[in-house]
Image (spheres, grey):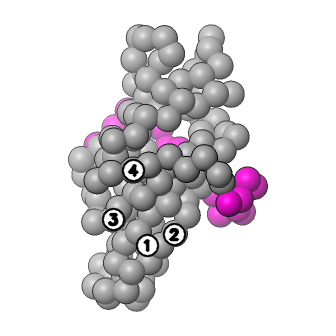
């Protein structure tokens, strides 16, 4: 699953339905992922914006950016994050493209103004500066 960085954002204001990154030590990064593709990921302010593609069209799909919250003891600290997708049993075959916004502020690390986000289901690492 590849991913590129887009240097020219189409929109710089997060939508009203933007979610926050979910940090919980009990998160299992390998559980509960229905098929999808991350086509692009970039940081815009305190948000990571991901362009995703998936099949469906007959049910609401749910995405969540998750992490155990276990930062590495490096500088800058690194945090593994995983984008999860639940298709709610949607068996339709339409191709859906969507832009997802996730608020990264809950992942800010005390004592520094930047972290590296390693998006585990892509080949992308983003530097989050705050």
The disc, 4 or 3, on the residue closer to the chain's N-terminal end is 4
Q: Check contact, mark 2 vs mark 1: CB within 8 A.
A: yes
Residue beneath label 1, please?
61
Of marks 2 and 1, the one in the foreground = 2
The secondary element bearing badge 3 is classed as loop
The disc, 4 or 1, on the residue closer to the chain's N-terminal end is 4
Q: Check contact, mark 1 vs mark 3: CB within 8 A.
A: no
The disc, 2 or 3, on the residue closer to the chain's N-terminal end is 3
Q: Check contact, mark 2 vs mark 4: CB within 8 A.
A: no
Image quadrant of residue 95?
A: bottom left
Of marks 1 and 3, the one in the foreground = 3
Does residue 19 appear anywhere in the picture? no
The disc, 1 or 3, on the residue closer to the chain's N-terminal end is 3
Image quadrant of residue 56?
A: bottom left
Q: Which mark is residue 123?
A: none
Is 5 located above or below residue 60 in the figure? above
Q: Residue furthest left?
A: 30
Q: Which mark is residue 98?
A: 2
* Alpha carbon distance from label 4 to label 1: 21 Å
Residue beneath label 3, please?
36
- Horizontal arrangement in the rendering, residue 90 relative to residue 104 (left or right): left
Q: Check contact, mark 2 vs mark 3: CB within 8 A.
A: no
Residue occupying image coordinates x 39% and y 17%: 72
Which residue range is magenta in the image? 10-28
Q: Residue furthest right?
A: 13
The disc, 2 or 1, on the residue closer to the chain's N-terminal end is 1
Residue beneath label 4, please?
3
Residue occupying image coordinates x 50% and y 60%: 51
* Alpha carbon distance from label 2 to label 4: 15 Å
């Amino acid at each position: 699953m590849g991913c590129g960085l887009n240097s020219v954002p189409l929109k710089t204001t997060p939508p009203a339905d933007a979610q926050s990154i979910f940090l919980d030590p009990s998160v299992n990064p390998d559980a509960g992922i229905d098929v999808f593709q991350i086509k692009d990921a970039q940081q815009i302010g305190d948000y990571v914006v991901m362009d995703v593609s998936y099949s469906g069209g007959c049910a609401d799909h749910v995405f969540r950016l998750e992490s155990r919250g276990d930062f590495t003891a490096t500088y800058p600290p690194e945090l593994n994050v995983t984008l999860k997708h639940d298709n709610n049993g949607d068996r339709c075959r339409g191709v859906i493209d969507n832009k997802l916004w996730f608020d990264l502020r809950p992942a800010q690390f005390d004592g520094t103004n930047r972290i590296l986000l390693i998006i585990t289901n892509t080949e992308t690492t983003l530097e989050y500066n705050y």
